[in-house]
Every structure is written in C-alpha cells, then in structure tokens.
Image (cartoon, rainbow, N blue to C red):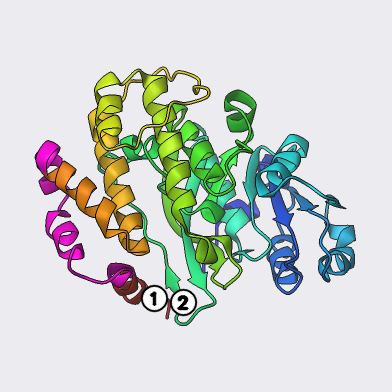
Amino acid sequence: MQKELAVKRTDPSLLPAITIITPSYNQGRFIEETILSVIDQGYPRLEYIIMDGGSTDETVEVIKKYADRIHYWVSEKDNGQSHAINKGLRMATGDIINWINSDDMLTPDSLWIIAQHFLDHPEAVMVHGRIEYFGQGKNYYSRNLPEKDLNTRYAAHICMPQPACFFKRKLVLEQGYLDESLHFSMDTDLFVRAGLHYPIVQVEEVLAKFRLHGDSKSVSAFSKTFLDDNKKIFSRVLATLGAEKEIAEMKSLQLYEEPAYLYHKPAKAFDTGKMLFYFLAHRLLTLHFRGDKQEYKKIFGYLLKKHTGLLISSGKLVLYRLALFFPRGFFHSLAKLRDRAG
C-alpha cells in the first residue's frame, strides 16, 4: 500500500489540477481497467481526456459506460499515437499532465502522491517515479537511476518510464509538443527537452503499471526503430549544444544524423563528453537486449578506448565485458528476478 499523504487533508482548491490523456486504438479488452485506474483515484481536480483513433472493437462501448466521468473523449481517425496525444495536450488545462496508454494503469493514490511531490518541489517541471511491469509471468518493478550525473543523463537519454512521468503544462507550451515524426521515442524526445531546460525530480513511489503483452508496442516492436529514433534525438541534442567534438565521435560510429531542426538552446551548460558516454552506455543495454552483437562490440570497444575512465568509474566495465559472452536478454532476465514484485 502507498503511504497516506497529508495532501489528502488539504483544501482541494490548493491542489494542482491534473490532466490525464489516454490515446487509444483497438484496446477494448484492456481499456476499462485503464479508465477505472484513472477515474477511481478520487482526485478532486482531475481532467480526463481519451483520444481514440477510431477503434473498430469494443473500445467505444467501454468508453461510453464512463462518459459522465470523462471530461472529453472522441473516436476518430488520427495519424498515430503521437498525433493523438498532441490533440489531448492542446486541449489539456491541467497544471500537471501525463498520458496513460489504453493498456496501462495508474496505481491507487498516484495522483495524490504526484500532487504532493509537485507541492514539495515547486521548482520542478517534471516529477517521475517507478512502474510495475505486469502481464507476462512474474511482475517486477523498474529501478530508478543513481543520483550521480543524473542531470547529465536526463539530457542524453530517457531515464524514466513514461507512465510514471508527470510534467507541468509549461513544458509543452515553452518547448513544443510531441514530434509526430517519432512513433516510438516521442516520449524520449520530450523528456530530453525537459532535461535540457528544467529541474526534474526523481521519486521512489510506484506510480503506474505497464502491461506486457504480445500486441504492446514496447514488447512486440522493440526494434531498430527505437535505436534509430534515439540517435536522431541525441544528434539533435549535440547540434543544439554545438558539441563539435562529440558530433565527430558520433560520426565515427556512424550514429550521427544531421537534424532537420534544433531544440531551444538551454541556458545552463552541460558536460557533453559525459552526455555522449551515457548515451552510448544506454544504447549498449538496448543492443544486448536485441542481440545485436556487432554494434555492441563496436560501441563497447570505442568506450573502452576513448572513455576508459568513465567506463571504469561507472562500475559497469565487467558487466559490459561479460555481456559479450551471454545470450541476448540474459541480464534483463536477471534484473526481472531481482526486482520482482511479491
């Protein structure tokens, strides 16, 4: 059980308004649980928006059952998940926003918990916690990253699970909406922009549940498209920061992609060398999960030669070397056992 929060006893008018957006398409067998996880929070300043892409299954009938507790919903053809979320973001009026996909769920009291964290950290534009993975075998939890260099990581790659990440509306108003050309890593793109410009707070609470199933994009399509999206995003970061040395390194690895546009230039400075290290180290984990040993060996060899000190200080040198000899997903399976729920 999550702890009882003092915020529940405050005047509701003092609470931040929260908007939850659910993009949906043909997830009728799951969406009722999603809807109930949101509307049963009992949070007094909730705005709930569902953007359905014209589902042909039972989705619309399920939505209609709860229409009186949903602020706005529509079922119409769209241009994909990013487009659907953007439609909801442009409509949102809450101080704080998150999107929960139609096969995922909020945990009980998560809106109260996130409201309290934003009240405790008024400077933060984003607060994120952990999630519970469920649906395929034993449930397990995500883990937060160590605090060391966390601000550098925030600007280099996705550091948090999207369903447990809540942000102030000012993020999209000031830095722009989701990049609709990205169908897999649009959350990474938005969260990296947050990392470039604003304070982010990491908390320990489990705020959402992520369903693992065969039709899930993150399960069935964890493909090279994720890696391609992420190199495009990080190339944009380096170009925005004018990091010529790191751009040259990315080019030598055939990972740099000339960006079509740049982000807003941040006011604060970043250690772009460390950013590159964390981007490549994060990529290694994905490559091992996919079983792409050729690129894995190339990047590991490069880190060993060019970023030896950071590789050693990260404490992952032995792990990365061992991964060369273990089958794909081996360490991911070990992590699931370590972090299993119950």
The x and y percentages for residue 292 are: 32, 59
As for residue 312 lying within the magenta part, the answer is yes
Q: Residue at x 43, y 51 (%)?
A: 203
Front-most of residues 284 and 200: 284
Where is residue 170, by image quadrant?
top right
Residue density around tag 2, few if under 14, some if 14–19, many if 20 or more, within 10 Å? some
What residue is rendered at 39% in x and 39% in y? 154
In this rendering, would 323 be left or right of 17? left
Q: Residue at x 48, y 54 (%)?
A: 161
**Label 2 SS:** loop
Q: CA distance from mark 1 to mark 2?
A: 6 Å
Left-right relation of 163 to 68: left
The image position of residue 329, as x and y in percent, is: 33, 69
Do labels 1 and 2 touch, CB within 8 Å? yes
Residue 340's label in the rendered image is: 1
On screen, residue 190 above or below 315? above
Question: Residue 85, image x and y in percent?
Answer: 69, 45
Secondary element type, mark 1: loop
Dot 1 amino acid type: Arg
Residue 41 appears in which quarter of the rendering?
bottom right
Residue 132 is one of the magenta-drawn residues? no
Q: Classify the position of the C terminus by image quarter.
A: bottom left
Which labelled disc corresponds to residue 139?
A: 2
Q: Which residues are magenta?
A: 305-332
What residue is drawn where x is 64% and y is 43%? 97
